[in-house]
Image (spheres, grey):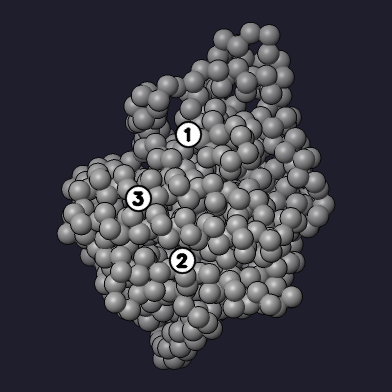
Amino acid sequence: MKPLIAGIALAISGVVAAQAAPASASTSATPATPGWVAKSNADAQPLLKALADFNPEFASQFGFPGFDDKAIDLKPNVGERSRAALTAARDQLQKKLAAETDPDVRQDLEIMIKAADRSIEGSKLNEQYLLSYNDIGQTIFQGEFTLLQDQVAPARRPAALKRLQCYVGMTPGCVPVTKEAQALFQAKLGDAKLIGPYKVEVEQNLANTGRYVDGIRKLYAKYKIDGADPALDTLQKQLNEYDAWVKSTVLPHARTDFRLPPAVYANNLKQVGLDISPQELIKRAELEFMETQAQMQMMAPDVAKAEGIKSATDYRDVIKGLKKDQLDRDSIEPYYHQVIGKIQDIIREQGIVSLPNREMIMRVASEAESAAEPAPHMDPPPLIDNHGERGAFVLPLGNPPNGKGDNQAYDDFTCKSCAWTLVAHEGRPGHELQFSAMVEHGVSLARSLFAFNSVNVEGWALYSEYMMMPYEPKGGQMIVLQLRLLRAARAFLDPMLNLGLITHDRAHDILVNDVGLSEAFAREELDRFTFRSPGQATAYFYGYTRLLELRAHTQIELGDRFNLKQFNDFLIAQGLLPPDQLAEAVDTQFIPAHGGKRPQ
C-alpha cells in the first residue's frame, strides 16, 4: 500500500489538499466521460478500495467517497494484510485483462496491475529492511487538513472531528493511533537485521509536533467545528506522550548514517519512474550541470545590465543581486497572481498549450503546512467525483527549524524574478495545468492515479519552465537557469549521497556556492535527498530530458507540420504515462495523425 501512495504524494511534493476559493469558481462543466474511460474507472474500484481501506486519508484526498470519518490502519501485521488486499485486487484485474478486448482498457488494466505489483514489492522491501516508524503528528495533520479547507463541501467538514476522535481512540473500535504506531515499532525491535529511522529525521519530526497541533487547532477555530475541544485536548496529550516515547525508544535505535539499504534505494528510484542506472544518470547530470553553468555565466553581464545590478559579472553575484529585490509578506500573493496573468497571456499568444477553464489558485503556506512540506508544491485536486475543486500552487516562506537554531527563512521564492519560474513549474503550464486538464478532460484513473510517476510529472513541469523562458524578463531567465542547474545537481547529488560517493558537507557547498541556494533551501534539499524522499529528486532532470528527446524526435519527423500546441495537448491528454509508453503513443498516434510515418 504505502509505496504507491507515497509515490503519488511525493511526485507532486504534497498530499494535503488546497485551501482556497470555493469550488463554484469553476466556469465549465466536465465533458461526458468516454465509454472506455468509464469502463476502466469501474475496473479500478477494487484496487482503489484496497488502498482506501488501509489509508482513508488517501481516499479523502483523491475524492473516493465513504472514508472521511475513518483513520489510517496501523494495527498489527498491517503490511501483510495490505499486501493480501492488493494481491486480491490485482488478481481481479488480471482476470479482467484476460477477457478484455478494448486496447485502451487493456492498457489501463496493465497499468493498474503493474502499480499493484510495485506497491506489493515496496511493502515487502520495507518490512525486510526497516523498522516501522511513523511521524504521527504529520499523519494526523494531513488527515485533518484534507477535510478542513475551503474547497471541501461544508457537509463534509464535520467528518474531520469523527476522524480525529478515531485518531485518539474516542470512537468505539478505534485504538489511539499513537499506540498502534508504538506497537508496530516495538513488534520488530528485537530483529537485529532491521534498521531504525535516520536520527535527523526523527529530531525534525519531534520539532514539528507542536506546529501540527497548533495548525489543527487553528483549522477547527476557522471552520467553527463544535464539540472538538475534548478530542483536541486528548490529541495534545497523546502526541506529547508519543514524543516522549520516541525520545526514549526510537532515538536510541535511530541510525546516524542516512543511507538506505541498497535494495530499498534502488526500489525508490524505480517507484519514481527512473529506468536507467544511477551511474548513467550521474554522468548525464554532471554534463548538464557544467553546460548550464556556462550558459548562466555567458548571460550574467546582460542580466546584470537589464536588472540594474552593478559590478556583477559572475552568475552567482547576479543571482544574489536578483534576490535583493524581495517581496514583503503582504505583496507576495498579489505579485504572483500578476505573474500568473502574464504567463497565461503568453501561453495564449504563443500557442503553447490549451489552458484549463478553471482559474488558478496560488497561496502562501501555513507554518504547519511548511513543516509537512517545506518546498513549493502543488496540492492536487480530487481526481474522483470532482465537483469543481481545483489544485493549488502553495508557497512556503521558510523551512521550519529542527530545534538547532538553523536559519529557516527563504529568499529563493520571494524575489520578483523568482516568481516566473515558480509559476511555470507549480502552476501553468506546469503541475496545476496538467492536473486541471486531466480533471476537465476525464482522463482515466489508471492514467491519472495509478500510472503516477515523478518522471512524467516533474519532467512536464521542468519542460514547462523551458518553454516559458524565452518570453520572460532577463532576471526571470536567469532564475530559470539557476533552477535548471539545481535539477541537474539533484540528479547527481541524490544518488551520490545515497551511494556514498560524496559527503553531506560537499553536497551542501555545491548547493549554496554553485547553485546559489539559501541555507534554508539547501537544508530542505539535503533533507529531501537523505530522508524526506530519497530518490525522488532524480526525476526532474531525467523526465525533462526524456520529454525534450521526444519533442525533438517528433519535430524532426514532422518538420513544418509540427504544431507545438497540438503536441503539448496530446501529451497532457495521455495522463501520466511513463516515458516509454508516452513515446509509443506519440509514435503510433500523434505522428501518423499529422502526416508522419509510423515506426516500422
Q: Which mark is residue 438?
A: none
| Residue 338 quadrant | top left
Mark 2 or 3: the one toward you: 2
Q: CA distance from mark 3 to mark 1?
A: 19 Å
Q: Can you identify the residue that label 2 sits on? A: 178
Looking at the rendering, in which quadrant would you find the C terminus?
bottom right
Q: Earlier in the sequence, mark 2 or mark 3?
A: 2
Disc 3 target residue: 216
Secondary structure of the residue carrying numbered label 1: loop
Q: Give the structural element (helix, strand or loop) at label 3.
A: helix
* Amino acid type for the residue under numbered disc 3: Ile
Q: Secondary structure at mark 2?
A: helix
Residue 71: percent from the left, percent from the top? 37, 69
Q: Amino acid at mark 2?
A: Thr
Residue 332 lies, with reference to residue 490, above or below; the image says above
Is residue 113 visible in this depiction of the protein?
no
Measuring 39% from the left and 36% from the top, which residue is drawn there? 364
For mark 1, what is the residue? 397
Q: Residues within 10 Å of mark 2 (few under 14, many from 20)?
A: many
Give the residue type at disc 1: Leu
Give the residue displayed 37% in from the left and 23% down from the top. Answer: 331
Q: Position of residue 373 (x, y in %)?
A: 49, 48
Residue lying at 53% horizontally and 79% vertically, measured from the top left: 79
Residue 359 place in picture, x, y as percent:
28, 41
